[in-house]
Image: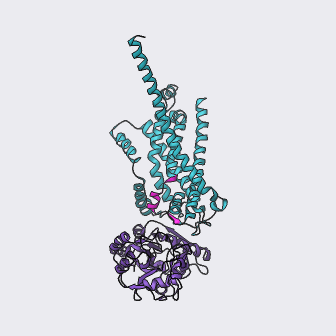
Chain colours: A purple, B cyan
Amino acid sequence: MHIAPRAHSGRRAGKVLLLVTAVVAAILAALLIAACGDNSEGGGGLSGTIVGDGSSTVFPISEAVAEEFGKLEPDVRVVVGISGTGGGFKKFCNGETDFSDASRPIKDEEKEACANNGIEFVEFQVAFDGLSVMVNPDNDFVECLTVDELKRIWEPGSTVDSWSDVRPEWPGESIALYGPDTDSGTFDYFTEVIVGEEDASRPDYTASADDNVLVQGIAGDEDALGYFGYAYYVENTDKLKLVYVRKDALEQPEVAEFMRFYLTEGRPLVAEVGYVEAPESAYQEGLDLIP
Amino acid sequence: MTAAEAGFRRRLFLRKATAVGFALLCILATSLGIAALALLLVDITREGVGRVSWDFINSFPSRKPEQAGIKAALWGTIWMMGLTASFAIPIGVGAAVYLEEYAPRNWLTRVIQTNIANLAGVPSIVYGILGLALFVRAMSLERSVLAGSLTMALLVLPIVIIASQEALRAVPNSVREAAYAVGASRWQVVSRQVLPAAFPGILTGIILALSRAIGETAPLIMIGALLFVPFTPSGPLDRFTVLPMQIFNWTSRPQPEFRENAAAGIIVLLIVLLTMNATAVILRNRFQARARQ
């Protein structure tokens, strides 16, 4: 998939109106488990305290998951803080927390700090990177689009041709659609989270593997509507949301159960609090990491 | 009318105009402050008063704004204020009594005095760093109410000490001398004459200090006070959150309903603050009345 480096977004913003969107959404949950001996293994119902901290932008997801998990396992106390990604890692690598929310991957020096304290970790992706949906800057009627409207525009066999097909009060001009080509990860992602089925998209749009071509196209066409990814996390690391959990904590049944819950029941909550779900495979990979 | 008389009248008018002008300026300064406060209160009340309810006060945080409440934050605040007060007041007043009534005037006390004055101006986040290193890590208190309260106590100690010193200094020396004259020991002078006389002033300082502590967020974020806490503290070593942190987080959420919650949270925080201050004012008035008898 083609990824525009970060520097492009500034240039883009100059040319194209950043429209709607589910911007954010790469959430990686990494679980790190360190060896600490504070685990009480209660038989039967799970109990204990799970301490999380880190990014305040991942907080809403962890909060939602903790809230729901608390209803299921009332004896497990899940608490979450908002020290920020870096602040969260400091505490995490110091053995003070069980999991750490992060909006970027762990840095090398943070890994080192963890290693020095004998803390190992596992990384789970809990949601995905963001999408940008854009229209031409001269377009003055589109202020926002709902996910549902985007779905109607982009689903296979879509009957949407003009703006007025989206909302009756909008003009009757045909929409010129731009998007990444089918090899793109952004395409997979967009179709999965917006259309609802991976790789399911209407075929009649201007496709390009080059984000810049898409930007140019949208900038030069008053009736353009296009999307591209804020890309995969490696290329656009500042858009990441991660959660790190200590490995020894993951061996505790309540923490393992909490993470399992995070990656399964937690998925719909991701969207509910305003983020975008990661692809199925990311959750599956995460689940495989839980002992 | 002679020229001298005319000159005098002109100067008299100028003097009177200056006096009136200055008074007007002072009124303006006062009303500006009050107007800003009133505006804030009206705004907050309009936005949040509909959300203040028993459910709001008695619910734990939630991702759903309409179900979210401040139970954990409110109890966390009450716990923290109680513990902070019980550390800061005895230590602060004790330090003030020592510095004013016992300590010799030498370079050491001057250094201490200067440092206390400087500490009062240190940004609160610095106390957070200190609290993190000392209480959370070195003393292994973790992110408990106790660690938070000790940090807050450090933060407000300079205010308590300075205000108490001022109050002690305001007690006329004749009171001490009269007590010594009838054979009282130093302990008797301090405990039965000076402290009761200074008590109203000391209480004012304590009100100011605790009012600051109740609204602080930065040092608590630093020591890692949590935000999503689905229980109330049952002891000083429990984890906790406080109202300002909950309000701070709600205002940063994109959904407008959370901002309503934040406004409602502010109203509750103000009520807690006013209750606390009212208690202190009532106490102060009672002591003032007694001191006058």
Write down the region rendered in magenta. Answer: B214-227
Q: Residue furthest front?
A: A172
Residue B282 relative to residue B144: left or right: right
Measured along the vertical axis of the image, is residue A160 above or below residue B54? below
In front: B124, or A284? A284
Q: Is residue B229 left or right of residue A129?
A: right
Q: Position of residue B162 (x, y in %)?
A: 44, 41
Verify whether residue B210 appears in magenta.
no
Picture coordinates of residue B57, whole percent (x, y): 63, 60
**Residue positioned most to the right:** B54
- Residue A78 visible in the snapshot: yes
Which residue is at the front of the view, B59 or B102? Answer: B59
Q: Position of residue A34 (x, y in %)?
A: 43, 77
State the residue at coordinates (41%, 62%): B138
B218 falls in the magenta region: yes
Q: Residue at x 42, y 19 (%)?
A: B10
Query: Which residue is at the far top?
Result: B2
- Quadrant where the N terminus of chain B sits is top left
Please give the name of the residue rendered at 35% of the width and 70% of the height, measured from the top-left corner.
A10
Left of B291 or right of it: where is B20? left
Q: Is residue A239 left or right of residue B269?
A: left
How many labels, in total? Answer: 0
Q: Nearer the viewer, residue A195 or A234?
A: A195
A233 or A204: nearer the viewer: A204
Residue A291: x percent and y percent?
Answer: 49, 85
Give the vertical position of A14 relative to B37 (above or below): below
Q: For the C terminus of chain B, which image quadrant? A: top right
Q: Is residue A254 visible?
A: no
